[in-house]
Amino acid sequence: MCGICGELRLDGNRPDPDLLQRMTDRLARRGPDSAGHWQDGPLAFGHRRLAIIDLSARSNQPMLDAAAGLAIVFNGTIYNYRELRAELQGRGHTFASSGDTEVILKAYAEWGERCVERLIGMFAFAIRNLRTQELFLARDRLGIKPLYYARTPAAFRFASNVQALLEAADIDTGVDPVALHFQLTLHAVVPAPRTVLAGVRKLPPATTLTILADGRERQQTYWTLAAARPAMARSDDEWLEAVHERLLTAVRRRMDVADVPVGVLLSGGLDSSLLVALLAEAGKEKLLTFSVGFEDQPEEKGSEFEYSDQVVARYATDHHKFLIPNGEVLKRLPEAVTCMAEPMVGQDAVAFFLLSEQVSKHVKVVQSGQGADEVFAGYFWYPQMAAAEGEDSLARFASRYFDRDHAEFLQAVEPHWHGADHSSEHIRRLLEAPGADTYLDRVLRMDVTTLIVDDPVKRVDNMTMAWGLEARVPFLDHELVELAMQVPPALKLAEGGKGILKRLARGRIPDGVIDRPKGYFPVPALKYVRGEFLDFMHGVLDTPAARARGVFRREYLDTLFAAPEAWMTRLQGSKLWHAALFELWFQLNVDPVRGSRS
C-alpha cells in the first residue's frame, strides 16, 4: 500500500526532478516508510512506501527488472501473489524479492497487458516497458485504489491523489461544468473519468491505459459485471452456503496476506461485526478491533459502543475504543479535507480520518465492512426502488437518490454553469445497459461499479491512507461480488435489507447487533447544522474566494442559511454542507496552488 506518481514527457524534454520530488512529497502520508525515484529518458517515477508485504528493502519501489526491461510503481495488495509467483516460477521466472510488486512485473513480462485479469486484489500501478517505450497503467476491478492523471501538450502525469498532480504549473484547475452537475446531484459522486477539476481525470475501475511510444493512448476495459441468475437454480440454503464460503475466503485472503498484524474497524454494525466472527471462524485469535465514538447530541447518540461491545465480549478481541470530543471534530475538519483527493460530503469522512489516526498507532492494516450495503442491498432506498414498478427507470432511481433534481441545480448555481441534465443522462445509460435481470439488479450493479467507487470506497482509502493505514474491504472481493450479483433480489431484500447476510450472521454475532435499526457512522457535530458548525460554513461560503469562484447563487445560499436543517437531501444530507464542503475543498487544495503561481 503506497503512493505512486510519474511524469512522461511528450515534448522531447526530460522530466523535472524538482517537480517529481514535490509530487512524491505530496504522497508522503500514504507511504511513510520509504521513498524512491527512478528516471529513464522522458519518463520518471516516484514512490512512497507503506511496507506491508516483504518488509525488506528488496521490495522498495520504483522496482526495476533490467533483464525484462521493465519498471513499476504500484499501490495496493495482490492477494493471490503467492499462487501467481509459483506459477511464474514454473514458467522459468526468478525472483529477487518475496513481495507482490515483483509478481506484477513478472506477470506483465509473461502475459502482457492481460496480466490484470489474473490479479486478485486492489491495485493501481504503472509499468514502463523500456523496449517498446510504452507506459501501461491499470486500476483494479472495483476502483478500490485511486489513479488520477493529467495530460497537457507537454506531458502526461499520474498520481494517487489530485494534490500531487497540482504540483505541476500547467494543470487547468478550473471547475469542470459536467462534474459540477454530478457533484451536486449524485451525492458528490463524479464518475470516472471526470473530476471536479477540468484538467484532471481518473482512470475508471477495471480499466487499463497504455501510452504508446508516439503519445497516442489506448484504453481497454478488462472486466464487466453481470447481475443475472445462473442457468442452474439454487435453493436459499445453497445460496447461503455459497455466500458464506466466498466471504470466508475473502476474509482469509485479507488476513493472511500481510507480514504485519491485521485489525478490524468495528463500527458496531452488522458488516464489521460479521467480519470479526468470520475471522474467528478462520482461526484468528486475539484479534485487534477498533471503534470510535463522538459526543451525543440531544437527538442522537454519538457512538455505537453498546453494539460493538457485545461483539468484543463474544469474541474476546483486543479492543480499543476512542471517544472524540465534538470540538475536536470541527477543529480537525480542514486537515481531513486537505487529505481528500476530491470533495467528499459524507459525514463519516472526518470520523474515519480521526479513527485512522488512532488506529495507525497500533497496526498498519485493517479490514473494514465497506461495500456490504451496496453489494447486498442494505440501504433503505433499495426496497423503495424495487417496489416502484411501473415507473420510468430513471425517475424510479432519481426520486429516491438524487440530492437535487436538475431544476434545483439550475437554481443553485450561477447561470454560466447551466447546461444539460448530465447526471440523468449518465444514470439512465447505466440503468439501461444489458446484463441485468431485474430493476434492482441494475441498480446494485450500477452502485457497485460506479457510485460506491467515488463515495464510501474513495472516502475510506483517502482517510485511512492519510495516516499510512491500509484498509482492506472483503465485501468488495471481486469474486464475492460476482457471486452476490447472481443472488436473487428477494434474498437480499429480506428482513429489511441484507437478508442473506443477516441469516449468515445468526448464531455468529449477537441478535441485538443483527436486529438493531440500520446505523451510520454517527458524527452528530456535523449532522445537525447549528452553532459552531453553522458559523463555520458561513465563514467558508462568505469569503472573497467563494464569491470570486462564482459557483453558487447567493440567493440559493441565503435560502439554505435561513433554515439549514429544513434543506436536506433524499439521503438525509445537508445541502448547505454540500455547498460548503465543495468550496472548502477548493480553498484548501486548489487556491493555495493558484496563489503561488500568480
Image (spheres, rainbow, N blue to C red):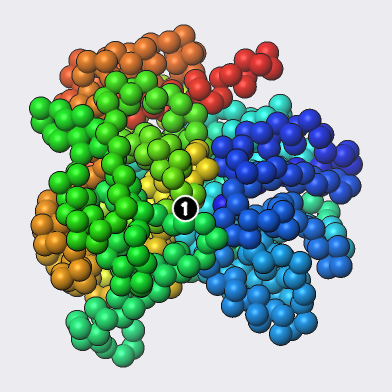
Q: Can residue 414 be seen in this view?
A: yes
Residue 532 coordinates in the image, percent (x, y)? 27, 15
**Does residue 505 appear to the left or right of 168 in the view shown?**
left
Quarter where residue 81 is shown: bottom right
**Does residue 153 appear to the left or right of 237 in the view shown?**
right
Q: Is residue 370 visible?
A: no
Residue 406 coordinates in the image, percent (x, y)? 32, 37
Disc 1 marks a residue whose amino acid type is Val
Rendered residue at 49%/20% (across/down) = 587
Residue 329 position (above or below residue 464): above
Q: Work out which residue is located at the far top of the displayed protein and give it.
A: 544
Q: Nearer the viewer, residue 459 or 137?
A: 459
Rendered residue at 14%/61% (across/down) = 510
What residue is shown with label 1? 365
**Does residue 542 appear to the left or right of 56 in the view shown?**
left
Residue 531 position (above or below residue 322): above
Residue 454 coordinates in the image, percent (x, y)? 43, 47
Rendered residue at 74%/76% (across/down) = 110
Residue 313 coordinates in the image, percent (x, y)? 19, 56
